[in-house]
Structure formats: C-alpha cells, structure tokens
Image: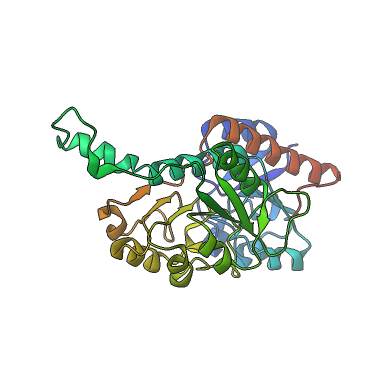
C-alpha cells in the first residue's frame, strides 16, 4: 500500500506529478492553510510536498496527526512553518542545489538584459523607432568586462553566478553572514560595503525574517546612479517601493527582476518603467531543473518512509 502524501504545489509540471502519482497515494490540494482541515484523508497523510512560496502553516501541520515529513520541491522554504514542524518532530527537506545552474543562468540573462538595455532595444524596434541604418545612439550602454559584480548570498546559486560573471571578465565580490572558505572572491563584511563597491548587485540570498527588505533605500543609494540590481531571490528581499523610487529618480541605472513581493501581482509602476527587465519567476523553469527537483523530492519521501538518512534535511 503506497504512503499517502498531501500535494500542495498546483503549478508543478505534469511530468513531475505523474512520477509522484506513480510512487505515492497523492492527495492534491491547492491550499497550505487551515482551510484544508476538511481533508477526509488527513488522518492517513504521512508526507507533504510543497514549495517555498506556498509553504504550509502551523494549523495544517497540527491537523495531520501522522505527518512525518514536509518535502520542499524547490530550494526555498520561507513559508513553511519550520518551528511548528520541529515541535511536532516533523522533518523538513529542501532541494538545495537542484536548480542552481539554471537560476544562475537566469541571473546572467537578466544582468545582460539590464546592463545592455535589451528590453529597451526590443521595444524600440517594435515601436517602429529604428528609422536609419546606424545603430541608435540613445541606447548606448556599458559593457561587462571590468565591471564589478557584488553577490548577496554565496550559496549554491551564488557560487555559480560568480563563476559565470568571472567568465565575462568581471570582478566578483560577495557578502554572506560569514566568509565562505575556499572561494577566490573578496568578502565584504556588510551589504552596504558590497553595494558601494559594486556596479551590479546580484541578490541570491535566502528569504527569511533576517533578509526581508534587506536591499533598501540605503543599499540602492550606495550602488549609485550607474548601478544595476538583479534579483533571482524572493521578491520580499528587496524593498519594492524603494526600488521603484530609485529607478524612477535615476538613483540607480536599471534592474532585472525575476521575483516580486506579492506574486503574481506586479506594481504598475514597474511595468511602466523603461529601465527594468521583468520575468515571471521563471529562473528555475527548465526541464532539467524540474527533473532533478522531482527526483530529489521523491528520494526524500522514500528515504523517510524507509527509515533511511535524509542528507537534505533543513
């Protein structure tokens, strides 16, 4: 008899869903709140699959008496009530590293698009404004070689961003809670110091209470009028109002964003701005990443049910 697993990720690709349905008695639900307490299967659910932006709250954790594992399909787990899980003896796992390569690729794509003004160039052509053979001088931009990239959060994704940036002949430095041993890049003890040094600030830190709004008005001011900010972390890591004000006033030159504070809502002010590139949280949306996230999620669940070690426990 397969184990019963509550599935709280309505946006999961069908291929991943098919794989999980083939291994578990999958109860599919779209809410992670106490509203799900009407589930008739509650008394036999032993595992939950969710993602960071959906999570699972204390009320639902307490409503599932046989719950033993919460497996996060992605790498972030900011809306999982980890404290409530630990109080109940429920293990939480995260697929850290599964999507690191493709998210790092997206960071560089947004960096290139923002610095080289690709969105503006695309709109320039579509609006019929390219009317002579010469390249439009009004779209002149800076290059990448020799520019300084500051990375906020040198985890699995941040390290890959650093290596990619270095391949573009860019200088790299980073800020973490503490220096990371064995890496060749300069450590800045404060985010303010990193932003003041950098031409481009790439945000790849985990979202939690300590990082909420960490990229604020003062950080953007330190980055300066020629600076760009790239976000492939959760939207709430940036102070969205401060970012909009900085883009509108020219306090920074541009931004590339794949995360927003209240997804799927995106402020109209951001949509109107020419100097920002917007993406609908698609950094990890590659077939390879989803195959690996699915494999790791199934492995976590099966290891738990079999009493084996869980190397990716939070």
Q: Residue at x 33, y 60 (%)?
A: 247
- At which x and y percent is residue 309? 85, 46
In the drawing, does residue 254 fall left or right of residue 209?
A: left
Residue at the extreme bottom: 218
Q: Is residue 201 left or right of residue 265?
A: right
When the figure is inspected, residue 204 is found, relative to residue 296, above or below; the finding is: below
For the point 58% across and 50% down, the residue is 51
**In this figure, what is the number of numbered marks?**
0
Residue at (65, 30) in percent of width and height: 22
The residue nearer to you, when weighing 167 against 218, is 167
Q: Based on the displayed image, in which of its 4 quarters is residue 225 positioned? A: bottom left
Which residue, as the protein is rendered here, is positioned at the far top? Answer: 133
**Residue 15 in sight from this viewpoint:** yes
Looking at the image, is 13 positioned above or below residue 266?
Answer: above
Name the image quarter holding the N terminus: top right
User: Would residue 73 be visible to someone looking at this image?
Assistant: no
Could you say which is closer to the camera, residue 151 or residue 83? 151
Percent across and percent down for residue 217 are 43, 71
Percent x, y for residue 159? 65, 46
The x, y position of residue 300, in whole percent, is: 74, 43
The C terminus sits in image quarter: bottom right
Q: Residue 64: which quarter of the image?
A: bottom right
Picture colour scheme: rainbow
Please name the residue shown 33% across and 67% down the image: 245
State the residue in front, 259 or 135: 135
Snapshot quadrant of residue 163: top right
Q: Is residue 228 above or below residue 101?
A: below
């Amino acid at each position: 008899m397969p184990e019963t697993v509550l599935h709280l990720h309505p946006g999961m690709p069908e291929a991943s869903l098919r794989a999980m349905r083939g291994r578990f008695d999958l109860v599919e639900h779209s809410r992670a709140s106490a509203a799900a307490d009407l589930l008739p299967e509650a008394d036999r659910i032993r595992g939950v699959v969710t993602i960071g932006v959906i999570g699972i709250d204390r009320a639902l954790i307490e409503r599932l008496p046989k719950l033993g594992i919460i497996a996060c399909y992605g790498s972030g787990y900011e809306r999982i009530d980890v404290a409530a899980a630990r109080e109940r003896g429920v293990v939480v796992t995260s697929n850290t590293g599964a999507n690191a390569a493709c998210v790092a690729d997206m960071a560089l794509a947004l960096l290139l698009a923002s610095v080289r003004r690709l969105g503006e160039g695309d709109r320039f052509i579509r609006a019929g404004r390219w009317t002579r053979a010469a390249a439009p001088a009004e779209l002149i931009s800076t290059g990448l070689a020799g520019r300084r990239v500051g990375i906020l959060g040198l985890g699995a994704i941040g390290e890959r961003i650093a290596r990619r940036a270095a391949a573009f002949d860019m200088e790299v430095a980073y800020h973490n809670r503490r220096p990371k041993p064995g890496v060749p890049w300069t450590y800045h003890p404060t985010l303010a110091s990193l932003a003041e040094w950098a031409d481009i600030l790439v945000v790849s830190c985990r979202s939690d209470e300590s990082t909420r709004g960490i990229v604020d008005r003062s950080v953007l001011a330190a980055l300066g009028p020629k600076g760009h900010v790239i976000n492939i972390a959760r939207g709430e890591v940036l102070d969205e109002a401060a970012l909009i004000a900085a883009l509108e006033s020219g306090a920074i030159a541009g931004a590339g964003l794949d995360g927003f504070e209240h997804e799927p809502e995106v402020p109209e002010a951001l949509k109107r701005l020419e100097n920002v590139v917007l993406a609908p949280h698609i950094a990890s949306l590659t077939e390879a990443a989803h195959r690996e996230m699915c494999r790791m999620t199934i492995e976590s669940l099966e290891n738990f049910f079999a009493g084996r070690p869980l190397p990716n426990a939070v």
